[in-house]
Image (cartoon, rainbow, N blue to C red):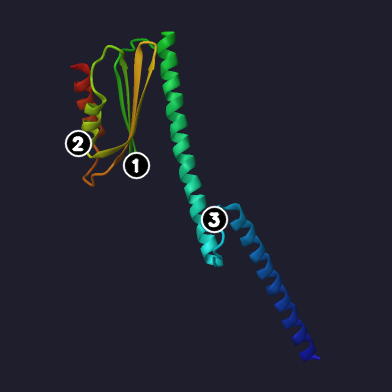
Amino acid sequence: MKSSQSSSSKLERKTLEKNRRMNMKSLCFKLSSLTPSDSPKMALSMPDKLEQATEYIRNLQENIEALKKKRDLASHIVETSKDVTDGMMIGFRLPVIEVRESGSAVEVLLITGLKKNFMLCNVISIIEEEGAQVVNASFSCTADMVFHIIHSQVTSSRVGFGSARVHERLKELVYWT
């Protein structure tokens, strides 16, 4: 009698394990079908599929963070522009210089009048001399103002980037040209 209970118990465990494996295989297939494949003709092993899905999710998270930063910057610019054009900012004077650091990312925002004559390449040179590499630079003209936005990455491994020094150098450049 013990042997029949033991064999039925083994059979039950085998069935449970088989169902578990089939369920895991189904879930992994579903996950891999949701991620883009570099080479759909080549069959990947299950660990490779999981690694590919993990990398895809990690890239999506990085894209979300970058888009959030762009959205925050755009809303800041819109708010600043609205305040300036509505005359709501008391004591607001051009130019405005902001240097923001977030980890290894550095963002420079310059708002100047149309009559300010400085070259964007000089601004980029200052940022690069202080140990950051410019990734993206853009400008936009509205009414009588020019908005310059420069995104960069800190490349130098020294103690810090020195955003205060960059701010001072940019102030000298913008105020004295």
Characterize the local packing of mark 1: few (<14), some (14-19) or many (20 or more) Cα atoms within 10 angstroms.
Answer: few
Q: Earlier in the sequence, mark 2 or mark 1?
A: 1
Q: Mark 2 or 3, which is nearer the eye?
A: 3
Q: Which residue is mark 2?
A: 129
What residue is shown at x 45% (from left), y 30% (from top)? Answer: 72
Q: Residue 2 location in percent, x, y?
A: 78, 90
What residue is shown at x 42% (from left), y 28% (from top)? Answer: 73
**Residue 146 versus residue 89: which sits nearer the camera?**
146
What element does badge 2 sit on? helix
What residue is shown at x 47% (from left), y 48% (from top)? Answer: 59
Disc number at residue 103?
Answer: 1
Report the amino acid beneath label 1: Gly
**Residue 95 versus residue 51: which sits nearer the camera?**
51
Report the amino acid beneath label 2: Glu
Residue 98 visible in the displayed image = yes
Q: Earlier in the sequence, mark 1 or mark 3?
A: 3
Report the amino acid beneath label 3: Ser
Residue 95 to residue 151: above or below: above
What element does badge 1 sit on? loop
Q: Residue 151 location in percent, x, y?
A: 34, 34
Disc 2 vs disc 3: Cβ atoms closer than 8 Å? no
What element does badge 3 sit on? loop
Q: Which residue is mark 3?
A: 37
- Image quadrant for the C terminus? top left
Disc number at residue 26?
Answer: none
Residue 88 visible in the displayed image = no
The image quarter in which residue 17 lies: bottom right
- Image quadrant for the N terminus? bottom right
Q: Residue 34 location in percent, x, y?
A: 60, 52
